[in-house]
Image (tube, rainbow, N blue to C red):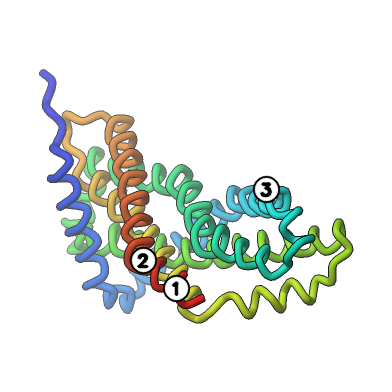
Amino acid sequence: MSHPARPLWSDAAGALAMAGYALRHIHVLGRPPHRSRFLRLLLDMGARGLASTSLAAAVAGTLLIALLVRTITASPELAVRLLAVLLVREAGPMLVAIPVLLRTGTMMTARLGSMQHDGEARSLRLLGLSTRDYLAVPMVLACICACVLLTVYVEAAAVAGGIVIAAVLLELPARELFTHLALVLSPRDVAYVAVKSMGFGLVIASVAAWHGLGRSDHTSLPDTVGRAVMQSVFGLLLLNIVAAVLLYGPLAAGT
């Protein structure tokens, strides 16, 4: 007998509730088992993310140089400003979020869904451990931290690599281009990127935790993972639009 899937609004409300729960219960990381799980997840997400985001950084830097090569020769200041807008503010966090979703988000949903279906989550409850505190909270917080750290890595690698390549190919002083970049970027840009990266990590992990722990017996694991991925993509795009509307306008006016 087939069962209808939960409506989208129900999943959205559940993911929001999961995100709020994780943020309100950061203090559980003070407990050794929870802190140990958080650190293991952070290292695992970082290792998985480095493999995929390294390629993204190289491709982003190369494409930006191809796009801006004529602009750099005409106006280095304008080229660096475009670099800051296209990569640092906008593309960088998304270049990290998509690989993290596809590699780590799917794994988190599948793992939690299997634990829920096989009775491992129930065993944790019998041991006196809250499944949300032990499974979801460390996972959500680790994903937030991993997205921020990977975004810093990707943007630094792409920007530095792109500027160095431009300096070599066009015989321009790299120091001048880095100086222009330092003048263009502001603390508000850094805050904008950090907040958006944290938001992306929160969306990915909260949706994964909600679908994984909320998996019912009549829902197959591939269906659960697929639904989580699609809703995460929608959440990332929506958050990107909201961030641009709320923050990008004032930032653009101030630069």
Q: Nearer the viewer, residue 29 or 167?
A: 167
Q: Residue at x 15, y 32 (%)?
A: 5
Q: Residue at x 80, y 71 (%)?
A: 174
Label 1, on which residue? 253
Give the structural element (helix, strand or loop) at label 1. Answer: helix
Amino acid residing under circle 2: Leu
Residue 97, given in percent of the width and then of the height, sits at 46, 53
Image quadrant in which you'd find residue 179: bottom right
**Number of other residues with Cα within 10 Å of mark 1, as a class: few under 14, some 14 to 19, many 20 or more:** few
Amino acid residing under circle 1: Ala
Give the structural element (helix, strand or loop) at label 2. Answer: helix
Q: CA distance from mark 2 to mark 3?
A: 32 Å
Image quadrant in which you'd find residue 11: top left
The residue positioned farthest toward the front in the image shown: 74
**Number of other residues with Cα within 10 Å of mark 2, as a class: few under 14, some 14 to 19, many 20 or more:** many
**Position above or below: 116 against 148:** above
Q: Earlier in the sequence, mark 2 or mark 3?
A: 3
Q: Earlier in the sequence, mark 1 or mark 3?
A: 3
Q: Which mark is residue 63?
A: 3
Amino acid residing under circle 3: Leu
